[in-house]
Image (cartoon, rainbow, N blue to C red):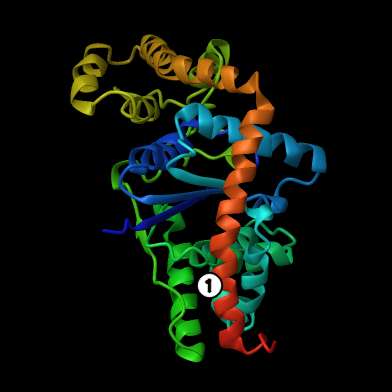
Amino acid sequence: MQKKVLLSGIQPSGKPHIGNYFGMMRQLLADQEKYDVYVLIVDYHALKSVKTGKEMKENIIAVTLDYLALGLDPKKVTFFKQSDVSEHTELAWVFQNITTMPYLMRAHALKDAEAKNKEIDVGTFNYPMLMAADILLYDADIIPVGADQKQHIEIARDTAEKFNRIYGETFKIPEPLIMNEVAIVPGTDGRKMSKSYGNTIPLFAEYEEIKKAVMSIVTDSGEGIPKNVFDIHSLLRPASELQPIYEEKTGKYKELKELLIEDLEKFIAPMRERRKAFEADINSALKILEEGGKKAKKVAEAKMAEVRKKIGVDVY
């Protein structure tokens, strides 16, 4: 029986944090046996935030090392970067020509940018079309996302359905897979953990970096149990196990933070050491990424050939 296809991507726009791990990465590792998995480094999406070639290159290498250190198995997973498969941007252009501006103006990311009074670039506006292409090129069945990303999957579904109505059955309709209990991982300030908010705990942090992040966690002096500390801690231990500890140390925020630092160090240290081992042989790690790109491109070429035929540009 053929496995369902699961696809997920990550932007090379900085160091991964524990929110990335508990929100998506952990799920990917668990799904390697169950699904036919595609993991892509979405470097073209990252152009919205990464503005120098040097930084982009460093980030791509870093993300490659991160995933391999976490245990992503290239024998089971197609691991590649978006820019190695030109069909992503080609298909995005096709989708843009069947999508209206009012439809894209409903996107949450666009509204967020407008609310911050930012001068909005075309990439931010068209972002959902490239994401739809990322997903639909590989006939993905399942897309693991955080709750805040669900709309992007809905847009991909709508785009597939519209293309199929206009040109005939071509694309599979994907389904989002949300881990509700950790769909939105809290950051050190109580908001969603995000690099853009500067409220993260890096996934491969050294001990002093962990200590600095945890000690910066915002607490309310009126709280008996500091919610932000408890919410992050409950990623590492069951809430039922933590509850009596936190009740016993009511108001002792420093002690509770020190306990969280200790548990984070136990969790992060083994992954940190594995990453250092991969970093010692970067060329071998990049070779894995390159081979994954070749494998993905064969699949994308076949789907794009079908699309070109459907839209009528394949005349030879």
**300 relative to 117 in the view: left or right:** left
Report the quarter where the N terminus lies.
bottom left
Q: Residues within 10 Å of mark 1 (few under 14, many from 20)?
A: few
User: Can residue 190 be seen from the camera position used here?
Assistant: no
**116 relative to 212 in the view: left or right:** right
Q: Where 194 sits versus 98, above or below? A: above
**39 relative to 11 in the view: left or right:** left
Q: Amino acid at mark 1?
A: Arg
Name the residue nearer the viewer: 199 or 86: 86
Image x and y of residue 195, in percent:
59, 38
Name the residue nearer the viewer: 53 or 139: 139
Image x and y of residue 68, in percent:
52, 31
Report the quarter where the C terminus lies.
bottom right
- Label 1 sits on a secondary structure element that is loop
Image x and y of residue 59, in percent:
68, 37
Residue at image coords 67%, 27%: 282
Task: State the image quarter where residue 289 is shown.
Answer: top right
- Residue topped by disc 1: 106
Q: Where 256 sits versus 305, above or below? A: above
Residue at image coords 40%, 19%: 267
Which residue ends up furthest to the front in the rendered image? 316
Name the residue nearer the viewer: 96 or 262: 96
Q: Where 16 sits versus 183, above or below? A: above
Count of numbered marks: 1
Residue at image coords 55%, 34%: 16
Image x and y of residue 74, in percent:
49, 39
User: Can residue 226 be seen from the camera position used here?
Assistant: yes
